[in-house]
Image (cartoon, grey):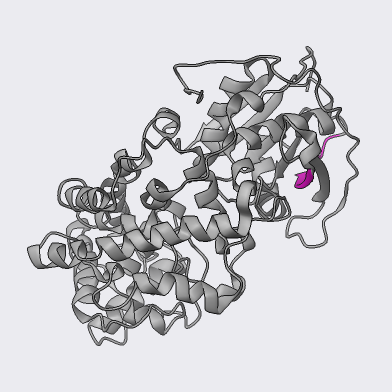
Amino acid sequence: MRLSIFGLFIFSALESSRALAPVSVTWSDCPQTITPGVQCATVQVPLDWADESKGMIPIALSRLPAKTPQREGYMFFNPGGPGGSGTEFVQYLGGEMQAIIGTGWDVISWDPRGVGGSGPNITLFSGETDYDAFWNPLYGKGHVGAHGNLTISSDVDLFMTQVSAFDGVARSLNQKMIERNGDLLKYVGTCAIVRDLVYLVDSVYGQGNDVNFYGISYGTVIATYLTQMFPDRVGRVLIDGVLDPEKYGNRIPTKWMEVDIYDLDFTLKSWTEACAGSKDCPLSTRYDTSSTLLTKIDTILNTAYERYDGSIPVLNISGVFKWPYDNVASFIQGGLYFGMLTDDNGQLLAALEQYQSNSTRLSGKVVPPNISIPIGRSPYSIMPSYDTLPRETLNNIAFAVFCGDAVDDGSTTTEEIFKETVRISQSTSRIFGSLFPTSSMRTMCHKWTSLRVDLRRLISWVTRRDSSV
């Protein structure tokens, strides 16, 4: 029986007669950290919480200890994903988080299963050649990545010719994942991640203590599963940038795609209103308004579509000028999501406008020659090149978690997904609606066959005690 997140079946103190005893955690200074004072540790947990004979896997942790003589509390954090590294967050931004929640609090996080320093080791590609050979068929003239905004019939017609090719990539992703990882894929789902979290609290702060947790984006799904799986262990829980947990837990992923972009057009308009006439906004001149900036962005996107020469997108500063519509729109979407369009990424967008218009200057602003580019060739990649891709991004752990968690009745077809993409492009978001095949992992979940282990086997006996943090 599958857990229904809100039509809830709770199995307390279930099928395991005892809990795994907490361990003593040994902390040491992290070897590479931007934030002073961050400590690292590793805790071993069962691969299968219901069957310890299947072996143990490491879970990597990082924490920034409280700066007060007596700790006031502790807060576990997840930065989203699936696939976001919690240890890297603490090592890079732990100080900023602690300034928000209070210097008397430990800021602590972990790498969820398959991410960073945590097992199991999920692999997909053997190297750059393998990586390129797999994803490049999505790009180039006449392929799915060459689409525009899907508002003109010729563009839609070309887009729909790519159903079979995309279907093949989705099937290959599933097959390749299973061939390389087998049953390990069943043990990286959100339920197992939450069970690990409870055990980490037991081991670091004492058995039965409250689970204090702050999650953003996908981290809000972890928070929701926590409250449903272990209601007696919930302490202080914060959620930000909420991913609808009812849809995530109960609905076929491709049936709620447009939820992701409901507010993107509004967000883009709000950004142009703030950008208009600002000396700090790279795309704006003193005479620009929100309307003229939106027109500029439309022109940039349409020009990228019209001039696309069919080359595989190259992820460096010169390659940007040959990006197709898909990559430029994804770049803007990422900038809005991460709040980066006023920084280097905004300057890169301005550089693209300059290049397209054969202009060498824009309002006297100089565009820096070296700008980080947060976009990748594969869906859900946000790093600039193969060599710098973290293991979890390169091997698409996000697919294993998201698709493994997903409800799927087997009825969804790739053609339906493409038709839904066209509908969303024409009714919800003219700019961002067309991006789903190359930017959303859920468009491949209908071919995924490795579902997580049954939830009932993951809620093993846990204890709670009334205690202070």
Q: What predominant SS class does the magenta segment belong to?
A: strand
Q: Viewer-proximal residue, 186 or 6?
A: 186
Residue 113 coordinates in the image, percent (x, y): 66, 46
Residue at image coords 82%, 47%: 42
Seen in the picture, residue 21 relative to 98 is either above or below; the reply is above
Q: Viewer-proximal residue, 372 or 153?
A: 153
Q: Is residue 252 left or right of residue 213?
A: left
Does the stretch in magenta take in 177? no
Residue at image coords 39%, 31%: 247
Q: Is residue 85 left or right of residue 173?
A: right
Residue 1 coordinates in the image, percent (x, y): 51, 23
Disc tally is 0
Residue 335 coordinates in the image, percent (x, y): 41, 59
- Can residue 293 be seen in this snapshot? yes
- Can residue 284 be seen in this snapshot? no
Seen in the picture, residue 462 relative to 179 is either above or below; the reply is above
Image-quadrant location for residue 359: bottom left
Residue 321 coordinates in the image, percent (x, y): 34, 81
Magenta segment boundaries in residue numbering: 56-68
Residue at image coords 45%, 66%: 375
Residue at image coords 76%, 15%: 464
| Residue at the extreme top of the image, as rendered | 466
Does the stretch in magenta take in 58? yes
Q: Viewer-proximal residue, 205 or 133?
A: 133
Image-quadrant location for residue 152: bottom left
Q: Quadrant of the C terminus?
A: top right
